[in-house]
Amino acid sequence: QVQLVESGGGLVQAGGSLRLSCAASGMIFSINSMGWYRQAPGKQRELVADITSGGSTNYADSVKGRFTISRDNAKNTMDLQMNSLKPEDTGVYYCRGIVVTRGGFRGMYWGQGTQVTVSS
């Protein structure tokens, strides 16, 4: 009923930039919070940044000043601009949305993930 699809991952050298995008589609009435999470090999999934429908943002300390999250409520999309990338930013990045469907169901939905690899 609701799909989230990430794009924009890839391989980049340390100090470089990448922009991730997430597009939500399906039986969407509204999207509350949206966020980016990442999971490095052997580690738990962690919050990178999230953003409310009103535009309030929250960042992990490790990415503050380097990453910028944004969203377009009209298009149901969200972006993550990642600058000054470090090898420790490597991982699979997941898009997450708190979605209210047209049927009135409120739930958490995840994308399939996109790989980001930062070489030293």
Image: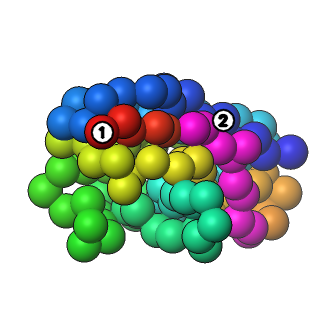
Q: Nearer the viewer, residue 91 or 69?
A: 91
Cα separation, mark 1 vs mark 2, equals: 28 Å
Q: Residue at x 80, y 66 (%)?
A: 105
Task: Determine crowd level at label 1: few under 14, some 14-19, many 20+ residues with C-alpha closer than 10 A.
Answer: few
Q: Amino acid at mark 2?
A: Val
SS assignment at label 2: strand
Name which of mark 1 and mark 2 comes first in the sequence.
2
Amino acid marked by disc 1: Ser
Using residue 83 as the reference point, say whether residue 13 is left or right of it: right
Q: Is 58 placed above or below 67 here?
A: below
- Residue 5: assigned label: 2
Name the quadrant containing residue 39: bottom right
Image disc number at residue 7: none
Quarter of the rendering occupied by the N terminus: top right
Residue at far front of view: 120
User: Is residue 66 placed above or below 99 in the rendered structure?
Assistant: above
Which quadrant is home to the C terminus? top left
What residue is shown with label 1?
120
x and y, in percent, of residue 17 in the image: 26, 31
Say if 74 sits above or below 11 in the image: below
Q: Which residues are magenta?
A: 106-115
